[in-house]
Image (cartoon, rainbow, N blue to C red):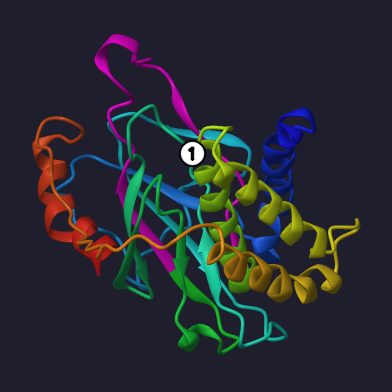
Amino acid sequence: MTHAIYWTARKLAQRLDLIEPLVYRQAVALPPFRYLKLERPEDPPLVGLDVDDSQWEKVYPESYWAGWLTDFMLRNDIQIPRDWDTSIPVAIRFRLGVSNDFSHPEALTYIDGKAYAACDRHHYEILLPNSLRDGQSHLIALHGWTGLGGWAKNREPNARLFAHTSALVQIDQPTRDFIAVARVTLGMANNIEENQPQHARLLTLLDEAFKVLDIREPFNEGFYASVPEATRILREGLTTIGEPMDVDIYAAGHAHIDVVWLWTLGQVRRKQVARSIRLCG
């Protein structure tokens, strides 16, 4: 009852939203993408270093670009700053827009002409290899498809994707780990009836963990220094909430293609042999 009176669950959700951006210690915005609309999914991807893309259209941040059912190429140049801590992972965070489809837009990403990883609405970060920390410029090319534009009954044929700012980002893994555990813990609490003792125990535990976090603004190194202790409190506390279940849990990842559901036949070929394999790999 106390947690209901003080709206603890709602406050914890707001705190999680507050610290979510802090997963990125530093970020460098990417320049506008160079964009070319392709005629068919079978068109070869223009990913080579010798491709002249100087006359392609530009996709600027905070602007509309491609419509639905569009095969596309996007190219850009990236350079990881030399002064970035080499112990912190670096990724590209793509913000190409969100369609009304389940997963689109989606693309296979090439680095310096070689296929590297796939990205879509659910996989919008691509971790970069340490070999790119050489202070040199490297070519990123995306060969993709914008999607169907949603279900037929609510599809807006003239709508276009809206691009936000894509960036090179430093990922603070301890912060991401804490947020992941905290969100699962809050989700468990929200799905347990309030009259069950585990409900209050989980919310109390989360509240105690957040009291350790230094979330004074402006955020600085004090926040990151406080994350390990908050994570320790949360993880150790979870072992005391209740008796562990005497079960074994098995999980197996998979990928499948729903032909003529979210993809045209040409896109099925592209997705099956390239993008899905890269997502699973």
In this rendering, the answer to whether 110 lies above or below 190 is below
Q: Quadrant of the N terminus?
A: top right
Q: Is residue 172 visible in this depiction of the protein?
A: no
Choose between 31 and 99: the one closer to the eye: 99
Q: Residue 257: image x %, image y %? A: 13, 44
Identify the residue at horizontal 58%, vertical 32% (top origin). Answer: 194
Q: In front: 172, or 80?
A: 172
Please state if 271 lies on the left or on the right of 178 as rendered. Answer: left
Q: In which quarter of the view is residue 23 placed?
A: bottom right
Could you say where residue 107 lies in the image, as x and y percent from the top left? 32, 52
Q: Residue at point 29% right, 34% down?
A: 147
| Quadrant of residue 146 within the rendered picture | top left
Task: Verify whether residue 29 appears in magenta.
Answer: no
SS at mark 1? loop
Q: Nearer the viewer, residue 202 or 258?
A: 202
- Kindly identify the amino acid type of the residue bearing the numbered disc 1: Gly
The stretch of residues the image draws in magenta is 140-168
- Residue at image position (50%, 83%) is 132
Single out the residue that lies furthest toward the right.
Answer: 217
- Compared across the picture, whether 218 is left or right of 127 comes to right
Q: Is residue 67 above or below residue 32?
A: above
Left or right of 182, for residue 71? left
Task: Say if 60 sits above or below 274 in the image.
Answer: above
Residue 252: image location, x then y, percent = 19, 62
Q: Callout 1: few (<14), some (14-19), or many (20+) C-alpha neighbours within 10 Å?
A: many
Image coordinates for residue 106, horizontal then vertical, percent:
33, 47
Q: Give the labeled residue for mark 1.
A: 97
- Residue 180 in view (yes/no): yes
**Residue 157 forms part of the magenta stretch:** yes
**Residue in the picture at 23% in, 57% down:** 275
